[in-house]
Amino acid sequence: MNVGIDKINFFVPPHYIDMVDLAHARGVDPNKFTIGIGQDQMAVSKVTQDIVTFAMHAAKPMLTKEDLAAVDMVIVGTETGIDESKASAVVLHRLLGVQPFARSFEIKEACYGATAGVQFAKNHIQANPDSKVLVVASDIARYGLASGGEPTQGAGAVALLITAEPRILAFDNDNVMLTQDIYDFWRPVGHQYPVVDGHLSNEVYINSFKQVWQESCRRHQRTAADYAAICFHIPYTKMGKKALLAGFETEDQVQQERLLTRYEESITYSRRVGNLYTGSLYLGLISLIENATTLSEGDRIGLFSYGSGAVAEFFSGRLVEGYQQQLNKKSHEALLDARQKLSIEAYEQLFEEKIDIDTNKTFTDDLLYSIHEIKDTIRYYKDGNE
Ligand code: CAA
């Protein structure tokens, strides 16, 4: 029995800034952001939007009534939790209308959380082939105004429906995992923004990729030629490219260039969005399968997941016959094109707005699913029926 991704969708908030504008405002050469970091635009969220808001927008449109009746597990991978105890997955479960006899929980390990969720889902489906698992990666990546990490921020969610006999990607059973206790990026309890050693984080990311890639090749007797494409966690689009070049420096030129071309196709959406943290790898996968010029059924795609701290995993899947019919390229492009560009002043103003969970307040936001009220420390969301 095959297990894998049956449906996949993403959502990003309706506002963004242009990286050239940000560079000018920060007194930096724009080429540093557009070429050195590899970002053109960056998604910006409002105070009325959080991980539940984004998760709803990503998951709701792709789920049918039959899916909601079959889902018996809702997993949210995030590092932007809104509660120290209660999982956002429980709120999502209710807002989506998933049948009640389900398990709902949240997973945290920096940007790796959703991959842990996907693997948990895979094991669950192998034991329960009739059920379906919803995994959502949802985050708001923020480092602070004028901080070193500022050009690598972003926001949004990716929803994946994991099932038996999937229609998009069937997972291979070839995962190689790696754990190393390293402080490259972390957020102590109570801290609003992460503490990050940016250059160390780049180094650990690249070394982690090399280790899991080489171990995977050793265990499964594969080479780069066995992969039609490799998707990377994309904190900024230059990062995956650096790892790819470092990991494949001993590969022949033809394989290197082929994988680099596929990588460029996998970053089309991320260049316009920035870092989704847990969702970034899966946004890259959507971008690849919607924009690649040469992929076909049966092709193997490698996936490199990385979460600072640090956990990495390399695994793969094969494109399923007819996968093209499950894609939504037009609506994804429309979502990105319909966004409103903000001036840097407007972005800074939005950035400084904070939710005070201890003060009762109502809010307005045009977004279908957004926070409409804080009352007695509880977030109440518009459920799309207003
Ligand atoms: N024209 C073209 N390129 C230029 C340039 C110019 N005028 N000026 C600089 N550059 C290039 C630099 O050469 C460099 O390229 P290489 O890395 O290929 O050498 C690139 O632009 C970035 O320049 P710096 O290294 O000087 O940039 P920085 O010191 O401002 O830091 C950063 C960059 C480390 C990514 C920082 O933005 C940061 O800390 N970001 C957050 C951490 C992060 O994303 N880490 C990634 C790995 S960790 C992870 O993946 C988990 C996660 O999601 C957070």
Image (cartoon, grey):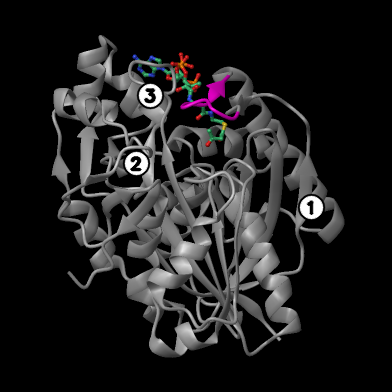
Where is residue 15 drawn, in percent x and y? 20, 43
Where is residue 61 drawn, in percent x and y? 32, 73
Residue contact between numbered discs 3 and 2, judged by CB atoms under 8 Å: no
Amino acid, disc 1: Cys
Q: Residue furthest right?
A: 219
Q: Secondary structure at mark 3?
A: helix
Quadrant where the image shows the N terminus: bottom right
Residue 190 sits inside the magenta stretch? yes
- Give the residues drawn in magenta, as a range: 189-196
Q: Residue furthest front?
A: 376
Where is residue 232 drawn, in percent x and y? 55, 47
Measure the alpha-carbon separation of dots 3 and 2: 15 Å
Residue at position x 68%, y 33% from top?
Answer: 309
Report how many numbered discs are placed on residues in the image. 3
Residue at position x 46%, y 27% from top?
Answer: 192
Residue contact between numbered discs 1 and 2, judged by CB atoms under 8 Å: no
- Residue 239 visible, this angle: yes
- Is 253 on the left or on the right of 379, as rendered? right
Decide which of 12, 56 is in the foreground and name it.
56
Q: Secondary structure at mark 1?
A: helix
Measure the alpha-carbon separation of dots 1 and 2: 30 Å
Q: Secondary structure at mark 2?
A: helix
> Which residue is denoted by mark 1 in the rendering?
217
- What secondary structure characterizes most of the magenta part? loop
